[in-house]
Image: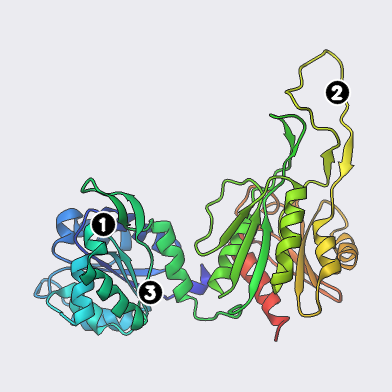
Amino acid sequence: MTQNAQKTVLLGITGGIAAYKSADLVSRLRKAGLRVLCVMSRHAAEFVSPLTFETLSGNPVAVDMFDRRQSWEVEHISWAKQADLLLIAPASANFIAKYTHGIADDMLTTTSMACKAPVLLAPAMNTAMYESPATRENLEVLARRGVHFIGPGEGALACGDSGPGRMSEPAEIVEEALSLLTVDKPLAGKSILITAGPTREYIDPVRYITNRSSGKMGYALAKQAQRMGASVRLISGPVQVPIPWGVELLPVDSTQELYERCIDCFPFCDAAIMAAAPADYRVKQVADEKLKKTGDDLTLELHENPDVAAALGEMKREEQRLVIFVAETNDLLKNARAKLRKKNADFAVANDVTQEGAGFDVDTNVVTLVAKVGSKPLPLMSKDEVARTILERLSEGWK
């Protein structure tokens, strides 16, 4: 992603079975546009070969303080200076103890001690070790110093125990890292309500009416809003998209459920972004049992659903903001402006779903930001980039 260009993550890998997850973590960090430098403890190198991390990161891996085969600067100083974030994953109880008490006796601990960048630790250890008074006290000391933590999660551990101690999943760690690396947080202190995905209107217990919305645009908005400092409530229909880290998910099924959730939540939010694609109509009489074929045509009587965005527009306070999405196949700007007025929204995100790279089930979008006066077409962009642009436009409205 463009906002992560030139950002460097210094990844420390300690000894433990969770070190295998760090290979996936490096790959995900690279895919997010980040430069990754890896420092391994000697014990970590017993679990996963340094060559694995060299291949995945595209950079040399530091393990031995006294390895003279490389003509680098003193790595623990040079790499510490280059880091925008120090990430230790997995962070063992041994490393946490040394880092707390300033013990620097190997490449990883000396590099960590020399690093002045923000620090994120992903603890991973046996449950008893995690719950021991010594570890708990060390974590509390580090938290007071401003160190950030993610996890650990709970579940079955390699030792056979079950409980807290599992390293958080790489996808979750990447999201937290990206949030810490986003220096500009124009939405800090704001509460944003975002809707996403389709709704389902049931015909009988097994059949329903829906649409092709994947939810990707709404989930991209939730992810970027959280990174930009907002507290995010995501009201979502049924989708197959991972829940963004740090976002509160409120699942719904029907348009009526979406309506009720939004009405309940909007009074406590600074803004709402209506990226969901709710069904406009519902079946007037839902069958109690599965409908059987009779050899005749089936006629369904449909009843109009409530207009969720319009309802929020009616109750919107002066200081609140409302952003709507408008998907059209013709007369894009004309229809977008009509809906903007009808729903009392601040601006609309309009897209022609017939354009290549726009619409449903793709990772890109082509949209035009339509205000009451004027419009701004955007080029083909990833949905993450579109989301960031929308949120930057939203934040300008509070300046």
Label 1: state its secondary structure.
helix
Q: Secondary structure at mark 3?
A: strand
Q: CA distance from mark 1 to mark 2?
A: 59 Å
Can I make out residue 221 in this image?
no
On the rendered structure, is 277 left or right of 305?
left
Amino acid under disc 3: His
For marks 3 and 1, give the CA distance.
20 Å
Residue at label 1?
127
- Mark 1 or mark 2: name the one nearer the start of the chain: 1
Count numbered badges in the picture.
Answer: 3
Disc nearer the start of the sequence (3/1)? 1
- 3 vs 1, front mark: 1
Name the residue tied to disc 3.
Answer: 148
Task: Give the image location of residue 353, x and y in percent.
Answer: 75, 51
| Percent coordinates x, y for residue 212 in the rendering | 70, 43
The amino acid sitting under disc 1 is Thr
Query: What residue would you read off at disc 2?
Result: 298
Q: Nearer the viewer, residue 46 or 1?
A: 46
Is 318 situated left or right of 232 in this image? right
Residue 67: quadrant of the picture: bottom left
In the figure, 209 relative to 342: above or below?
A: above
> Which three-letter amino acid code belongs to the residue tagged 2?
Leu
Q: Nearer the viewer, residue 94 or 114?
A: 94
From the viewer's perspective, is residue 51 above or below residue 340? above
For the residue labelled by badge 2, is the local secondary structure a helix, a strand or a loop? Answer: loop
